Amino acid sequence: MVSAELLKILVCPSCKGDLEYDVNADTLTCMGKHCPECGMPVNRDGKCADKECGKISKNFVGLRYRVEDDIPIMLIYEAEKIPLAG
Ligand SMILES: [Zn+2]
Ligand SMILES: [Zn+2]
């Protein structure tokens, strides 16, 4: 369980977007648009912000971060990629 204090200040490490906390699953989810390859944010054209990756995509993903011992694991490469509808 993540403390309310911590939830207030946490943002997605990829896109700096808001996180949705699922108390039951104990996960934090960002439903912003991220590159399906590397999880970095994408620009308006769907191009990945990461220079090394640079993938242009139409199927973006949200990122779901797990919580271990009350500590959210805020690592992009550790996050589960959730396909976004639309
Ligand atoms: Zn994000
Ligand atoms: Zn990428």
Image (tube, rainbow, N blue to C red):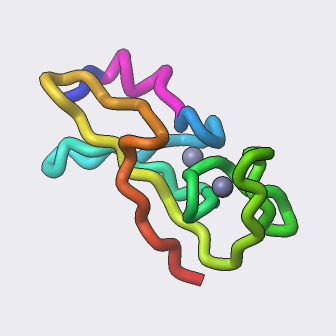
Magenta residue check for 21: no
What is the quadrant of residue 6 in the picture? top left
50 lies left or right of 59 = right
Magenta residue check for 9: yes
Q: Which residues are magenta?
A: 4-11
Q: Nearer the viewer, residue 7 or 76?
A: 76
Q: Is most of the magenta stretch helix, strand or loop?
A: helix
Quadrant for the N terminus in the image: top left
Residue 58 percent across, percent down from the top left: 69, 78
Residue in the image at 52% along x and 57% along y: 31
**In the orientation shown, which residue stands out farthest toward the bottom?**
86
Residue in the image at 77% along x and 57% along y: 54
What is the quadrant of residue 44 in the picture? bottom right
Residue 45 percent across, percent down from the top left: 86, 68
69 lies left or right of 12 = left
Numbered disc total? 0
What is the quadrant of residue 77 in the picture? top left
**In the orientation shown, which residue stands out farthest toward the right?**
45
Quadrant for the C terminus in the image: bottom right
Residue in the image at 49% along x and 50% along y: 30
Q: Is residue 71 above or below residue 47?
A: above
